[in-house]
Amino acid sequence: MQETPADEPDETGWKTSTAQMAGLSRLARAGVWALVVSGPVLGTLAFLSSSAPAQGADKPVAAATPASPVGPAGFAELFVAAYLQAGQGTERDLAPYYSGSVALAVKPGTRTATQSTVIASREVQPGYWSVTVAAEVTAHDDKGKSKRLGVQYFRVGIQATGPAGAGGTEQGATAGYAATSLPAQVAAPTALKPGGLAYETDRGSSSADPSVETARGFLAAYLTGTTELDRYTSPGTRLQPISPAPYAAVKVTGVQDDSSGSGQQKVPADGTVLHQLVQVDATDQAGSPVSLSYALTLRSRAGRWEVASVDDAPAIRASSPPSAAPHATTPSPDAATASPSPSPSNS
């Protein structure tokens, strides 16, 4: 009988010996234990890699809040008013604003600020402001007579504490202000000539022009309240007359617009827009005339002009900035003699 080799394959695949099967079982058990042992380590690495920030991602940066000039400006305005009023013997009135030692030679009340306003404020350093105040100054003599000295300008250095909303640099801190010196009187800002307006056609005040007639009727209703505004406005336009009515009568003295034609006896096609600058003399209840100017936008509809809006400001031509118009001024003698003569010294 012929023997068959043990390693000869049969028709169903390769035969495996018992020793080979035992080796494979040992390898499988070793692989399972390796996975069991390494599982916590792999999980920790996966958690750390998922929670770590991406190397290339930019962290968001909070935008800095710009410091507000409102607080320093108001403080400077009050300081200038107190400074003009103060004099010899009333120097303590300046203590809430300026802590330096001050000796004033002028009589108290020689000058007063009847009106004042801040015209410029600039942060020269974080929390430190330069504020310019315009004051309508009146001089008073020993006999009780007053003389208007006109508008004068004073610049003050103001330090601010507290958050940016108060002009300071410290979030959460209490707002506070202090002047670093007495005010400095400075020159008036340069006078400007405004840029050219967009109203190049003069309509005069003729009632024969439909657009002028619309402006006349609308402004009479707007200022006197004698008729409804709806008669003169476009559908959907929401305008209210001044209440109570400040004037008894309105007279149009001049109209300019931005149309190209010299005559507008005929209303153009629907939807045509016209910008007007209207000059009026309005007479109040006492019979006194007051000159006023109104910028209006008109729109054509159904053969008539209607007011679409009262504009916020007169329209100017494109690329028409204001130009400097300096003018020489001579200080009055009263302004020089009425000025306080302080002798400040910081303590």
Image: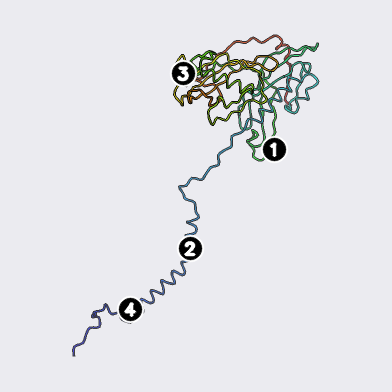
Mark 3 against mark 4, which lies toward the viewer?
Answer: 3
Q: Left of 201 or right of it: where is 176?
A: right
Task: Pick whichever, 238 or 137, lies toward us.
Answer: 238
Q: Amino acid at mark 2?
A: Gly
Q: How far, Cα to Cα, is label 3 from label 4? A: 112 Å
Of labels 3 and 1, earlier in sequence is: 1
- SS at circle 4: helix
Q: Are marks 1 and 4 in contact (CB under 8 Å)?
A: no
Residue 73, given in percent of the width and then of the height, sits at 66, 27
Q: Which residue is mark 3?
A: 266
Residue 143, given in percent of the width and then of the height, sits at 81, 11
Of labels 2 and 1, earlier in sequence is: 2
Q: Amino acid at mark 3?
A: Lys
- Its colouring scheme is rainbow
Q: Which residue is mark 4?
A: 20
Q: Which residue is mark 2?
A: 43
Task: Pick whichever, 145 or 298, lies toward us.
Answer: 298
Placement of 171 over or under 257, stated as above or below: below
Q: How far, Cα to Cα, is label 4 from label 2? A: 35 Å
Q: Amino acid at mark 1?
A: Thr
